[in-house]
Image (spheres, rainbow, N blue to C red):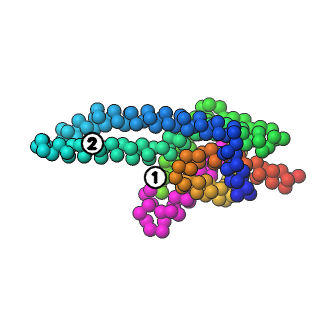
Amino acid sequence: MIIHAARLSIANLFAAETRKVFWKVLGLTLLALIALWFVLRSTFIAFVLPWLQSVMPPVPDWTNWLTFLLAVLAGLGLALILALLISPVTALIAGLFLDDVAEVVERRDYPGDAPGKALPFVAAMKSSLKFLGVVVAGNIIALLLLFIPGVNLVAFFMVNGYLLGREFFEFAAMRFRPPEEARRFRSQYAFTVFLAGLVIAAFLAIPLVNLLTPLFAAGMMVHLHKLISQKEAARRG
């Protein structure tokens, strides 16, 4: 069931409708990163650089190369900070378009079912910020465990698997169920949702490809929610 949902979600990533969402997310992400670059650079020039100059002792003219070297290192540092921000920024922006992905999946693969209801804008923004928090918190926890041999990789998958599975499954479920019922439904199938979260965590671990994680995860959990719901209905019928 989980592998089937993942396979369907990957196929949906290449659908024309999903590509439209991808280009919107990519374009907005690039604009946000460019804006962040200017903010970081301006902050460094206006505040950090004057502070460094005030605390550093005067240096002879023949050491001007040192100033140039520090400027180069500062530029590399800003680039590194920006690289670390790519994933959270993508997560924040993509979170605003998860309903678009869900609608594509429901239209293409479940045309006979009633469509889900998109979250209101405020709820969608809250969900996007929540997902951002999940990504940041999960990776901070994994980073803290990075130096424990034999635990770091396991921690990354366990933490991200649980958090990502929970958030995205509840998102998919809340398109068809009230929030409390969606959380109960997720708890009922907690182990299945966790295993699906591990698949999302594996996707997240692939460089560059991980920029598509929110779109992949949303599609996968829509499929998983549909498949579980169909299984429930068949059992009751």
Residue 27: x percent and y percent?
A: 54, 35
| Residue furthest right in the image | 237
Residue drawn at x 64%, y 47% as measured from the top left: 216
Residue drawn at x 55%, y 46% as measured from the top left: 211
- To which quarter of the image does residue 23 belong? top right
User: Is residue 158 or residue 50 the one in the foreground?
Assistant: 50
Point out the image quarter for the N terminus.
bottom right
> Magenta part mainly helix, strand or loop?
helix
Residue drawn at x 81%, y 40% as measured from the top left: 111
Residue 73: x percent and y percent?
A: 30, 46
- Circle 1 residues within 10 Å: few <14, some 14–19, many ≥20: few
Q: Is residue 148 above or below residue 123?
A: below
Residue drawn at x 42%, y 36% as measured from the top left: 36
Q: Is residue 108 visible?
A: yes
Residue 232: x percent and y percent?
A: 80, 53
**Residue with the mark numbered 2:** 71
Q: Earlier in the sequence, mark 2 or mark 1?
A: 2
- Separation of residues labelled 2 and 1 (CA atoms): 29 Å
Q: Is residue 139 magenta?
A: no
Residue 224: x percent and y percent?
A: 72, 51
Q: Is residue 150 magenta?
A: yes
Mark 2 residue type: Ala
Q: Which residues are magenta?
A: 143-171
Q: Secondary structure at mark 2?
A: helix
**Residue with the mark numbered 1:** 140
